[in-house]
Amino acid sequence: MNSGGVRESGGGGVEGGGAPPPLPPRGRLLGFDPGTVRVGLAVSDPDRLVASPLDTYAVRGPAADAAHFVKLVAAERVVGLVVGLPLHTGGEEGVKAREARAFGAWLTGTTGLPVVFWDERCTTAAAEDFLRAAKLNPKQRKERRDRVAAQLILQGYLDAGCPPEGTVVPPPADRGA
């Protein structure tokens, strides 16, 4: 998850404590592969058919991060955000998933845009495989890995039909029934 205090900068949700607004049915989405040092970014087309890698952002701290994401959302005319949710292989949430949810709440509070979470299991490994197959050297792969992982997260969400609830993780009691 983000370091530099993005998690600590407050904002457990939308100002006033209300629920975040739902994603609009049309418009560009910004995908996030959050990390402690870098955040991979991808963007969709307005019709939500294709996700494209956009950038890899180096975490700088709450104020700089907020300014960057607000500016990016405006420049790309984004209407909603999709944040990768790192689930365990069995589908349960752990510390990293809670950090991703805190990051999403911070993003909503910072940008005013709705956030959904999408299962990101294996996306970094898949991104690495794609980049290795493209015959990129280790330095080139490192520079691109996070944004390609964000692209895979966002494309997975688009391919699933953009479910408004995102990835639903059943409570532990409901598993195996």
Image (spheres, grey):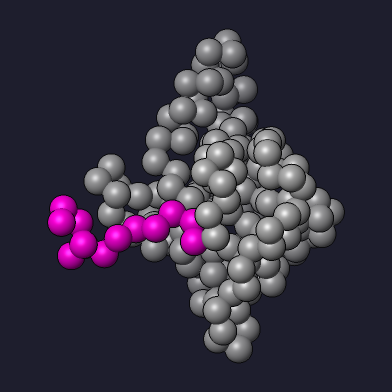
Please tell me which residue is depicted at 52% across the width and 16% down the height of the picture.
Answer: 132
Q: Residue at x 56, y 39 (%)?
A: 159
Nearer the observer, 159 or 33: 159
Q: Residue furthest left?
A: 177
The image shows residue 147 at horizontal and vertical percentages of 61, 37
Instruction: Please name whichever residue, 118 or 66, is drawn nearer the observer in this view of the structure.
Output: 118
Please say if 14 is above or below 54: below
Residue 173 image point, x, y percent:
18, 65
> How many numbered circles are shown?
0
Q: Is residue 167 magenta?
A: yes
In the image, residue 10 above or below residue 98: below
The part of the chain drawn in magenta is 165-177
Q: Is any atom of residue 1 visible in this view?
A: no
Q: Give the image location of residue 23, x and y in percent.
A: 64, 63
Seen as rendered, the residue at the extreme bottom is 16
| Quadrant in the rendering for residue 143 | top right
Q: Quadrant of the C terminus?
A: bottom left
Query: Toward which corner of the image does residue 114 lie, by quadrant?
Result: bottom right
Coordinates of residue 121 in the picture (x, y in percent): 39, 41
Q: Is residue 121 visible?
A: yes
Q: Is residue 127 left or right of residue 24?
A: left
Q: Main secondary structure of the magenta part?
A: loop
Does the magenta segment cover residue 9? Answer: no
Q: Which residue shows up at 61% across the image and 68% down it?
A: 22
Q: In the drawing, does residue 35 fall left or right of residue 59? A: left
Q: Please state which of residues 25 and 35 is positioned toward the viewer in this rendering.
A: 25
| Image position of 53 with respect to 108: above or below | above
Residue depicted at x 35% and y 50%: 87
Tell me: 123 left or right of 93: right
